[in-house]
Image (cartoon, rainbow, N blue to C red):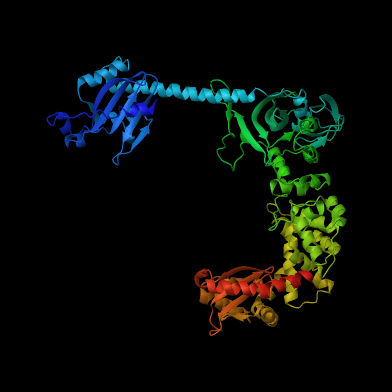
Amino acid sequence: MNKRALRKHADPQLHFPKTNGLLYCPQIKYIIRTATKDIDGTRTLVLYLYETEKAAQGQCSPAFTVFQTRSDFITMKHCEDGSTKWLTANTDNLNRDWRFTNHCAFYTPKDGQRVTRYCDGNTEDAFFSLNRLQNGIKSRKELERRHKKERAIIQRMDAMPSLPRDLKGFIHREAAPQYIFYDYHRSKKPMEGYCTACRHTVQVTGAKHNQPGVCPRCKKPVTFKSRGRRGYFSDRGTVQVIQKLPENELVLRIFKFYYSYSHEDIPKISIYENARAFISWGENRKPDADWYYHSYNSGDLTPWKRGTRPVRNYWQDNFEADSCGYLYTRNLEEVLSETPWKYSQLEAFYLHDREPMQVIPYLREYLQHPALEYLVKLRLYRLAQSAVYGEDSGYIVGQNPLNMDGQNIGEVLGIGKQYLPLMQEIDINRATLGLMKKLLSRGISVESKLLLWCQENAITDADELERCLKHTSAHKLIHYLQEQSQDDCFSARVYYRSTSQTLAFGIYKDYIRFCEDLNYNLTDDFILYPRHLKEAHDRTSEMFNKRKAEITDQKIAAEYANLLKQYRMTRYGLMIVPPKTASEIVEEGHALHHCVGGYVSRVANKECVILFLRKKEEPDKPFYTIEVKDGEVQQIRGYDNCDPPPKVEAYMKVWENKKLLPAAAMQQAA
């Protein structure tokens, strides 16, 4: 509708006689006057809605003007400040009132009759006729908009290539679980069975229901199932196919499959396409994925809808919305040959373990960091996995040891090439790489057995590992902990992502620390390798707790002179001093109302450094507390954890340049 033309007819300058009874009816909020006019070549019904209270006071400007044609309608709202707004709501929903027209009345019967005639109503209720016409127009517009979207989707799907002919065979060979169904009998004679992998009758011996095995004919991994016990069951899975489209585009097609077994050895198979992602790329080397999904609540023209499939709860399994699946690889070389992913090594990455994967994160990571190609070519698959998905077997280190912006493998790994065979041998993950780099920086030799053991048992604490290796060799440490981990006290406490050896190492490292603090002779194998580790740990822990305060004070006092020499500086009326005892750290926290008192053990074990910032004229009064770790200021806090003022910040900047940075450089050189 032409809004410029409509504005000319927005206010007809009508007036109401003060004797009109409608002006004094409290239940009527709006009086409606109507007219039919030729606006922009279209016969238009116009409804003028006046507020009753204002009309009774002689203010005769409409609050709303409704323009209605047989194919469209729109409402102009006249605001109190003189501005106007265009509304598309039904007249019955104006002003966000429930049944707005219940509070309206026509000025004369002719006004209502004019509405009824224009709307072709068969009833005397003008509002009902108007609302029915407007609802019909809205429904038609909504249908047109939906069909326009669906036609765009159909056009998007026109260039879809045909599926690979052997897709069903690929699902059977690579994705679907395989079974041998056999007739059980108690004798030791071979049992006759049927292998779903090679689809042949085979003879099996020693088979147990629901136990894994290998087909004696095709050598494929299978699960044995006794026909008398199997009942009804089904398998499901996801398969991905990448295909090339014109104009620099790929399409990732997601397929779902179901294999259902009832009383027959041959399954009922259902395969259907679930989703599609159109992948394009530009000069910024950032791929854009345009997703579509097959909807059960299909549209009028196509069952495909744009966007990702809705997921009700991200923390629960939603099989239909899952895009992680097995990858069809037979066409990858041809499909990726003329794309930025020609050398991405996607096929080699998938074929390493043939497990379900998400393809788009891999493609995105390769365009941003082409060094991903090096990791896959060098068979460092776990590092490649962590680069793509940000994890490696669930163990994350605080600082990423991988530099994916590096120009060569040396810069990416941050380690000498002579260690590459070692990393390839164990297929090192990100956490173990970080551990390996820390050990080498401390002059500790690494070997495959040690790194593999650490990787399998999620041991990444270089400080504690170094503490143990000061007193024993890697071989003896591993052998001892393997023996101790057989104890029921460890195996009974295994929890998510841990092993009995992980728990044994945690107990042993604490035991070694207690022995060091108690000045035990760790050159004696009787002390270094106690027969019952858990009992020895508990005894030393009890002994340490009795002398904890004394030992802690000794450690803190022993470092006082070194820290004073290393960090003290007086400037701007401020100075820094280290604590002499554990009680000074606790009193600092009490005085400033913060939690530094809980750092006593960390300070004693040299896990961090706590320093006191004082005013020169008040050297014994707590002012600000500083935590230093790994050569950097972690935090500086005053009363109630307040931030430092500009004067303190200026002092800290000078102090870091003069004291902290040179100390960190000396430690790195050492």
Q: Residue at x 33, y 31 (%)?
A: 76
Residue 87 spot, x, y in % from top left? 37, 32
| Quarter of the image that includes the C terminus | bottom right
Residue 73: give x, y in percent of width and height: 37, 25
Compared to residue 412, the image places residue 45 above or below, namely above
Answer whether residue 51 is visible to the viewer in this image: yes
Q: Residue at x 80, y 52 (%)?
A: 428
User: 127 left or right of 169?
Assistant: left
Q: In this view, does 584 lie above or below 50?
A: below
User: Does any portion of residue 298 appear in the rendered image?
Assistant: no
Quarter assignment of residue 275: top right
Q: Position of residue 585 (x, y in %)?
A: 59, 77
Q: Foreground: 273 or 531? A: 273
- Could you tell me which quadrant the N terminus lies in? top left
Q: Residue 260: image x %, image y %?
A: 69, 26
Q: Could you tell whether 90 is left or right of 402 in the image? A: left
Q: Is residue 649 left or right of residue 480?
A: left
Pick the front one: 251 or 263: 251
Asked if residue 370 is positioned above or below residue 16 in the image, the reply reads: below
Q: Residue furthest bottom?
A: 617
* Residue 487 placement: quadrant: bottom right
Query: In front: 523, or 559?
Result: 559
User: How many marks do you count on the picture?
Assistant: 0
Which residue is located at x 61 percent, y 30 percent? 292
Task: From the viewer's side, name the closer residue of 91 and 428.
Answer: 91
